[in-house]
Image (spheres, rainbow, N blue to C red):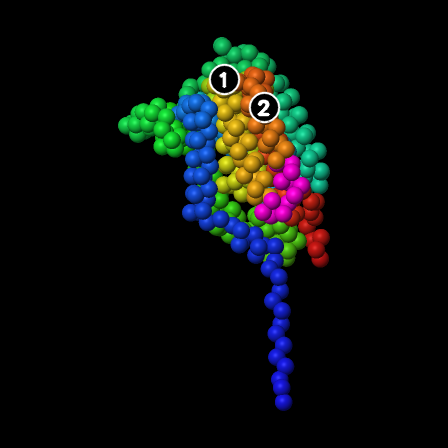
Amino acid sequence: MSTVVTTKPTPPPSPHQRADRRRLTLAQWMLVIAAGLALFSAVRLITDANGITSTGQVSAALRLAVPIGLAGLGGLWAERAGVINIGLEGMMILGTWFGAWAGVQWGPWTGVVFGIVGGALGGLIHAIATVSFGVNHIVSGVAINILAVGVTRYLSKFTFDTMEGGTEKQSPPIDSITSITVPGLSDWMRDLNNEHWFFVSDLAGIVGGLVTNLSLLTVVALLMVPFSWWVLWHTSFGLRLRSCGENPTAAESLGVNVYKYKYLAVMISGGFAGLGGVFLAEVAANIYQEGQTGGRGYIGLAAMIFGNWMPGGMAMGAGLFGYADSLNLRGGGTNVHALLLFLAILLALAVVWEIYRRKWVTALVAGVTGLGLFAYYLSVDEVPSQFVSAAPYVATLLVLALSAQRLRMPKANGRPYRKGEGK
């Protein structure tokens, strides 16, 4: 007599399990970053474009990346709770104005507090419109952007225009926030960077940019990235907030006050955007000027999407956009020319990877783009200044296009919600 033994087939892994398997460890991430820096260094040696990793270039990139990163953090907090915040630009504008207004009268740190409050007020308006009244999130955000421009222009006529050194479009100068330089280490990194050695000088340039003439507000902004990660992923408050963005009906059934968490998230979002605005007024320029934000709220939103709604990825996206913007400020025609070769090599590696994954169309697109960049690199000695000025925006579009396939936003992001709708 034979016995037939049947085995239950193992179910295929879920998408989340497959994603966990592909998640890189910290050590693997460090290896990837080191490999990228090594490639960057090789391109610098080939093209003799030593400015691409100079201490001054890194310092300028950090200064330009901070307001973008703060706006991106603001978008992350709101969208993790299920509210799309297109109004980041307007909240940054409110932050620049309120921060400058208070900073001129009572000092820069008071301006920081008022700028955060100004941005949070914009977030409160957005929350009232979207959460309480169910207004379309995009419509509300665009309205806030328009409203912020009008309100700040109106207020400037009654404040800055009556102050000595101010006009209706700009404020008087604001006292600077203290900057720090790590003695000894800063000079050592600069000397190493000037040697132009492979990898070592590039690493020294990056470290030197992080320890030279660093504003205390920059330090605060950098700390907000790990702080947001810890709060959102390692506290019960963060778990409840993220549940409102994934499945608010289920969250409500477990006793979570969804309205309260959405309100808090959007106000915190506005506060971060306002802090980014204060940075522009008090660190980047020491003066408020109309139109100062220059679309950084939108670029911050793009950085958040690039980072897949995660603080670390968002910080990388902000750094990329800040670096692209810094090339324009430092006369980067030669540097951008070198980066064309770097991008062509990256796209060649992407072709190999996509062929390995049997993604033929993606491989073809990457290959054609890479060949085009390489051909352009060979045909010119320096990139025209017009292209350098457009580099931040081109980088934004390219990054979003190339990263679109791996993105996963919160499931309930942008969806209307009404209390008790699951009953």
- Secondary structure under tag 2 reads helix
Residue 404 marker: none
* Residue at mark 2: 376
Query: Seen in the image, is 234 located left or right of residue 5?
Result: left
Residue ranking furthest to the bottom: 1
Q: Give me the residue at 57% from left, 28% from top.
A: 374
Image quarter where the C terminus lies is bottom right
| Image: 51 above or below 400 | above
Q: CA distance from mark 1 to mark 2?
A: 19 Å
* Amino acid under disc 1: Gly
**Mark toward the start of the polypeptide (1 vs 2):** 1
Expressed as whole percent of the image width and height from the top left, the position of residue 198 reads: 38, 31
Q: Residues within 10 Å of mark 2 (few under 14, many from 20)?
A: some
* Amino acid under disc 2: Tyr
Q: Which quarter of the figure has residue 161?
A: top right
- Secondary structure under tag 1 reads loop
* Residue at mark 1: 331
Q: Which quarter of the figure has residue 266?
A: top right
